Image (spheres, helix red, strand yellow):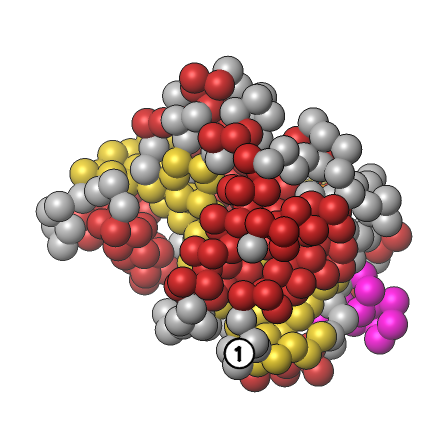
Amino acid sequence: MLIALLPGDGIGPEVVEQAVRVLNVVTDKLTYESAPVGGAAYKAQGHPLPAATLDLAKRADAILFGAVGDPDCDKLERHLRPEQAILGLRKELALFANLRPAKLFPELADASALRPEVATQIDMVIVRELNGDVYFGEKGMRTTASGLREGYDIMSYDEAEVRRIARVGFETAQARGGKLCSVDKANVLETSQLWRDVVIEMSADFPDVELSHMYVDNCAMQLVRNPGQFDVIVTGNLFGDILSDQASMCAGSIGMLPSASLDDQQKGLYEPIHGSAPDIAGQGKANPLATILSAAMMLRYSLGLPDEADRIEAAVAKALAGGARSPDLGGTMTTAQMGDAVLAAL
Ligand code: NAD
Ligand code: IPM
Ligand code: MN
């Protein structure tokens, strides 16, 4: 099976390298092809998502992605910025369902920003819509009648977009604890009112799932107050982006949270939820576990290798139990040493 490796910028290549080392220990069924993406691709080829990179992503059975983002590129026209590469891949490949599991490995209870008795309760999945919302609406800059500069981004969802992600939310809840919390801002936004109406309509097809609704501001608070109350959250693109970074701190570090971005078949892009972390890039400080856990999700969801996925997750737990700690987890181990610890556990 062909894996497209898109390491990207900053710590992206550092963490992807460790994930490939781990994959190579658990299976010999994969071949790899790499391509530049993000700022690296812009600097080498003049575009953040070159045609050959997109082609590789389409041909591959699955994509393992690092991160994109480069401060050198922040002043470029928007369509040339590194972030357009990941947005383009999600859209071009119709990867509309982003699964972001957040759980605390018990060994990391001391690393969470929350009290251990609160943090250890977190075991949830955020199902984030990935192809719509304010991310993909009309946007631009204009001048108002009174001569002021004005930026705008249109937020919208149609009912088909909501239905297909709501279904993923209900099915994910069905396969887990049977509880789905739909997060929106229906008290203010029409987009959210439609979202809530459609989710309620769909709940008739899932009588075994206990559905609740929560406003996003309250959800941000509840994630810190009592993260254990959540099983599955389904939400839009922007809210899901923000809430998943927040959930990561309940789980110890943003360097711990993996993700899968799926289409309606088995095709998927797998990446840590974090970015290119320019502040620590090139220093061997990045925690590679989110990417290693993303590789495990790839084996499970796209490649039909669930036992190998289980082995990786067990090895991560064992490495943590053995004291593996990168700086974000309060330790001193380098990125490569964290990879070594997982390999040793395997
Ligand atoms: P970030 O996630 O890159 O970093 C936020 C903070 O978390 C930083 O202090 C960083 O050092 C730390 N951090 C992140 N990952 C870590 C890891 N694996 N180990 C240890 N510490 C880690 O977010 P940011 O600083 O807001 O963004 C930096 C760049 O990354 C921007 O250009 C942004 O657009 C981009 N970004 C890309 C993606 C993606 O490729 N999917 C996701 C988020 C941000
Ligand atoms: C993420 C990132 C991206 C997003 C950016 C880099 C476009 O924050 O993957 O969480 O907002 O989706
Ligand atoms: Mn994000």
Percent coordinates x, y for residue 136 in the rendering: 55, 58
Percent coordinates x, y for residue 266 in the rendering: 40, 72
Quarter of the figure with residue 292? bottom right
Viewer-nearest residue: 64 or 24: 24
Question: Does 202 appear above or below 56?
Answer: above
Viewer-nearest residue: 246 or 34: 34
Q: Is residue 43 magenta?
A: yes
Q: Secondary structure at mark 1?
A: loop
Mark 1, residues whose alpha carbon is within 10 Å: few (<14), some, or many (≥20)?
Answer: few
- Relative side of 203 to 224, left or right: left
Residue range highlighted in magenta: 39-49
Q: Residue at x 88, y 52 (%)?
A: 72
Main secondary structure of the magenta stretch: helix
Q: Residue at x 52, y 25 (%)?
A: 109
The amino acid at mark 1 is: Lys
Percent coordinates x, y for residue 178 in the rendering: 22, 42
**Residue on which disc 1 sits:** 29
Q: Is residue 182 shown to the viewer in this render?
A: no
Q: Quadrant of the C terminus?
A: bottom right
Percent coordinates x, y for residue 243 in the rendering: 50, 36
Viewer-nearest residue: 113 or 222: 113
Q: Residue at x 80, y 61 (%)?
A: 39
Q: Residue at x 53, y 71 (%)?
A: 27
Q: Is residue 32 magenta?
A: no
